[in-house]
Amino acid sequence: MFVVNQPAVIAANRFGLGARAGELSKIGNDPRGWLTAQVNGARATPSSITQLVTSAEALKTYDEFIEEKKGLKQDKTPKTDAKEVLRPMRQAIRNIYLAQVAARYQVATYSEESFRERLVHFWTNHFAVSADKFVVSTLAGTLENEAIRPNLHRHFYDLLVAAESHPAMILFLDNQLSVGAYSPLALSSRPHFRVGRKFDINENLAREIMELHTLGVSGGYTQQDVTSFAKVLTGWTVGNREGILKTSQPGKFVFREKLHEPGAQTILGKRYGEDGVNQVLAVLKDFSRSPSTAHFIATKLVRYFVADEPPAAAVESIAKAFRDSDGHLPTVHRAVVNCLEAWRDERTKLKTPHEYVVSTFRAFDYLPAEPQKIFASFELLGQRPYTPGSPAGWPDTASRWDGSDALMKRIEWATQVAHRAGSHIAPMELASLSLGETLTDHTSIAINNAADAVQGTTLWLMSPEFQRR
């Protein structure tokens, strides 16, 4: 049997996305070195991602669909005919989404820096948007590729600004609809108000930044702080293609003074003077430096990498690294690697469907060529890519994924994978290459005694060793 030291298995399967053939031997006796090398410095964008359309291009496709739909409605085109006219445009939107899914999992499956890729996925889920909102369906993957990937080697503040100013985030949380009551646009439009119409702020983005992205629900802020921050964020929007707010760069972030609520605002006891977009940046800078943010981020990282119930000592060690480095992400990520609790032998984390599928792809060193087939695996197991359904993102605790129905779906999927692989693989060999010395005697005996390769593969993929990390 292929045997390696346990820390190498932990590095590949708990920190990384699952071991590929030969990866455990590459990690060897320096698992921490293998991991920390992945967090330092910038990386070139993978070629499969550079080939995707940008967020501005994706949003243009969506806008064209909406304009065509409006035109058909104005022309009173029968619904059946309108549906046929719109079908290819709707499919174009779907294809953009599927292309983003395929590129994401191509990188995840074949990456030699799977810890770095797992961090990309962690931060994407932290700054969650959901593609089940139609306008976001073309944009969800672009937030990951345009805001998350390019900022992993920078400070949390840089990542925060990039995520909050991305069109996917703004449109997901409706900040383009937020207009100050005393903004230039509101004041100039008042004589023309229709009955019942008014300009008002939208608090969604402000609330989620404070509650989910920085300070946390226990961060000490009040409803008045949310309202004041929402006023600061007015004008934080996306460029239009048409109308009075048309810009030269449609589909990209823009700060519009016309929509901005003027004047100073007090947030968490600090007064922020009127300074246009810099007023927003000043608030985000202070949020990024708050001890509450350090603790909140550290708790999420420990829950993600160590245990569903985060050990307090581990949380404090990572929070300290965050505070002392001013949120320098490589320093924070190295602190995660150096967390003693993360190197315990216990497999405390049940893989989410996302992790389970990716680790299987990596173990087989295979990804389906058709984007729809990639998507179908995640859909079957209940975790469609880029669709967490809420700004809170996908949960990664066992209570969300270990129900009887979820288990049956995993068995169904593992069986499908095993049948597709057929007798062309040796399940015992793959089990050893992916699990190393964590492969138990009980599982080894079960695989060796299986009726055929299909049954052996299913037993391997459903073993406790493979299901947990």
Image: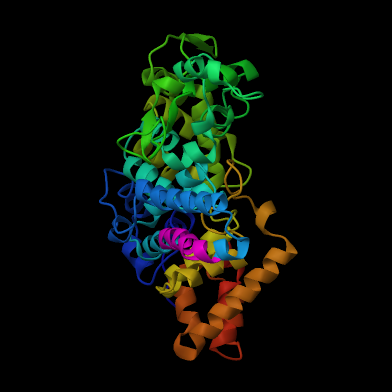
Magenta region, residue range: 84-100
| Image quadrant in which you'd find residue 272 | top left
Name the spot of residue 250 as percent of width and height, x first.
Answer: 35, 39
> Residue 156, percent across and down?
40, 32
The correct choice, above or below, for 357 with respect to 300 in the image is below
Confirm whether the magenta stretch covers residue 297.
no
Q: Nearer the viewer, residue 77 or 365?
A: 77
- Left or right of 350, for residue 431: left
* Viewer can see residue 355: yes
Residue 239 x/y as whole percent: 38, 35
Q: Which residue is rendered at x = 60% and y = 87% of the image?
A: 450
Which residue is the extreme one toward the right? Answer: 404
Percent position (x, y) of residue 447?
57, 82
Closer-to-camera residue (274/212):
274
In the displayed structure image, the side of residue 51 where residue 275 appears, left or right: right
Q: Residue at x 58, y 55 (%)?
A: 346
Q: Residue at x 51, y 41 (%)?
A: 126
Colouring scheme, one of rainbow, by chain, secondary structure, one colour: rainbow
Specify the quadrant of the image occupied by residue 41: top left
Vertical arrangement, residue 259 with respect to residue 15, above or below: above
Task: Determine the image quadrant of residue 320.
Answer: top left
- On the rendered image, what quadrant is the C terminus found in? bottom right
